[in-house]
Image (cartoon, coloured by chain):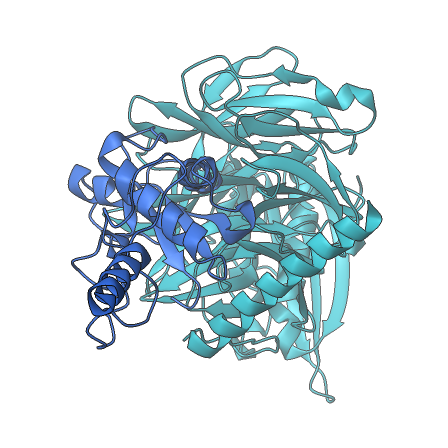
Amino acid sequence: MRKILSIALVVLLSACANKTINPDGEEGNQANTGAMSGENASGSPTVNPLVDPTNILSKRSVYFEFDEYVVSDKYKSMVLSHARYLRDNSNLSIRIQGNTDERGSREYNLALGQRRADSVKRVMTLAGTQDSQIESVSYGEEKPRAVGHNEASWTENRRADIRYQGE
Amino acid sequence: MISIIALYKIFFSKINSMWNSLHQSFSTIIVLIFCLFSSPLHAALDIEIFGGGASQIPIAIIPFAAEERLAQSVTAVVRSDLQRSGLFRMVDSVSSVPHEPSEIIYPDWQMRGVNAMVIGATRLLPNGQVEVRYRLMDIAKQQILISDMETVSVKQLRAVAHRMADSIYEKLTGDIGVFSTRIAYVAKQGKRYALKVADADGFNARTAIEYTEPIISLAWSPDGTKIAYVSFENKKPVIHVQTLATGERRAIAKFRGSNSAPAWSPDGKKIAVVLSKKGGSQIFLINSDGSGLRRLTRSSSIDTEPNFSPDGKSIIFTSDRGGSPQIYRMAVAGSASRVAERLTFEGSYNVSPQYHHDGKSFIYIHRNDSQFNVAIQSLETRQVQLLTDSAFDESPSFAPNGKIILYATEIKGRGILAAVSSDGRTRQELSTQEGDIREPAWGPLPKWRRKF
């Protein structure tokens, strides 16, 4: 009897350890974020979720339409996953880098890129991330990922990237 | 309250130093500082001239006596300077080569419509220096307009020629010459960005600093000794001020978020900057050493690209507070600084404003359909004139005499500089063999020429 009880206790406790409760009442684990490093139940080291391609945290880019800076629904859950991760790891910080396509004044584009970075930051702080963990900056049109002078390149460059410290 | 602020500041500086040390250990940025004379004496920029008008002054520039013995021809530089202004038409000598007024056969020249003539002589001195004598002649009145002489080292021959061109230009047009000024620009080659400073004719280009991260928004200090610029070496935009003579530089705006668009006040004591530290992009005023900070604009829109009026009392800037980027003006001091007056009303995209040195007009970039062109607008009449017709013009910069506008443009995908006269009649293209050039900034008049 005691053995069954203690086994049940261990099972219960380990089950609890794997769940996190979000303020909005949802149970955690839904984006499979996990802890930064550590061991799972079987004892082998886990992959860093920030670079694990199967983890949504490895996705870092929010794309925008021309002249747009609101984070569309398509990217909300990715941004919110990062928000939760930062909330759970208050020692971490990120820089959000805003970008634009090449058309127009460099300084005005720097400000547009800033607007995009600020917009992503706002989604995260509204979800509970500390303001001090996020610095939003802009590259404007200066560091394009795609260098063609066409719509395909411009679309790729209208983007905000999330970079964790050290990256 | 004070201790909370102090704790906040300590926390931020810890995060900042954490970022810095991490970036230093992981970065592959190469920072090279060349502040000494290192460039060969050929043009870094090739210049092509277009247009000009019927109202050009016909002038004959006769090669100076003994000039052919010098390593550098003086009249070649004078000729090139005056030609580039677009206001002169060169008339070549056919038979006679006068060096003294007594050698001039006036009827021959008058018959060919020549109004003015430059004659002179050079003499190599025993100490290696060169004596340069010249006269500017009025052919119609058969009079000497200018008679001058300078003794210079061989290295200074181009400079003395530029000074001659300035004097000739001023005498014949009544305007201040800018041939002794310098221009700054950014040259991009592959992944390297170099901030270069050259003579206004493209010669003697020197690299002030070179990075593997972008450099934008160059701004000369009014006394011509320093250049402020935005660099991305810290993986975000930071404003630096660099002293040209020594290469010494200092980050004067490295606040949290982005720091950009530096613009010097006319007395050189303050710099208007755009910071995102309070959210968005807003204009602040900071001392030129980076101390002190005062917020100027207070809007929830984008306010950027500030530019001081010549009297230092107001700024014009780009703002999209009205829904699209347009140009506004506001006072710098006092409570009036909250109110901004809109200046541009044509089109949905007007950016990058720069005051004329007389404070009565300004240039900017106007988007017309999908084309970006240089425009000039009178503050009094609100009249707008488009000065260029190319596809992608940006970063317009006035020459200190307000007669020429330098700007960046593109030909076949390559970045080049171009210049257009403020009446739109003459155009020049300045290109380089290697890579792209962009972000031009015309330097101020040298101290010894400043009249306004």
The correct choice, above or below, for A45 with respect to A24 in the image is: below
On the image, the x and y values in percent for residue B121 come to 65, 68
| Left or right position of B254 against B450 | left
The correct choice, above or below, for B48 with respect to B56 in the image is: below
Residue sitting at x 29%, y 36%: A76
On the image, the x and y values in percent for residue A148 come to 20, 48
Q: Quadrant of the C terminus of chain B?
A: top right
Q: Which of B210 and B2 lies nearest the eye of the viewer? A: B2
Q: Colour of chain A?
A: blue
Residue pushed farthest front? A1
Q: Which of B193 and B299 lies nearest the eye of the viewer? A: B299
Q: Which of B236 and B410 lies nearest the eye of the viewer? A: B236
Residue sitting at x 44%, y 73%: B29
| Left or right position of B356 against B89 | right
| Left or right position of B21 against B193 | right
Residue pushed farthest bottom? B126
Q: Which of B257 and B313 lies nearest the eye of the viewer? A: B257
The correct choice, above or below, for B338 with respect to A58 in the image is: above
On the image, the x and y values in percent for residue B82 come to 54, 48
| Left or right position of B75 against A140 | right
Q: Quadrant of the N terminus of chain B?
A: top right
Is there any visible trace of residue B201 in the rendered image? no
The correct choice, above or below, for A38 with respect to B303 in the image is: below
Residue sitting at x 49%, y 41%: A107
Figure chain in cyan: B
Is there any visible trace of residue B264 in the rendered image? yes
On the image, the x and y values in percent for residue B204 come to 53, 68
Q: How many numbered marks appear?
A: 0
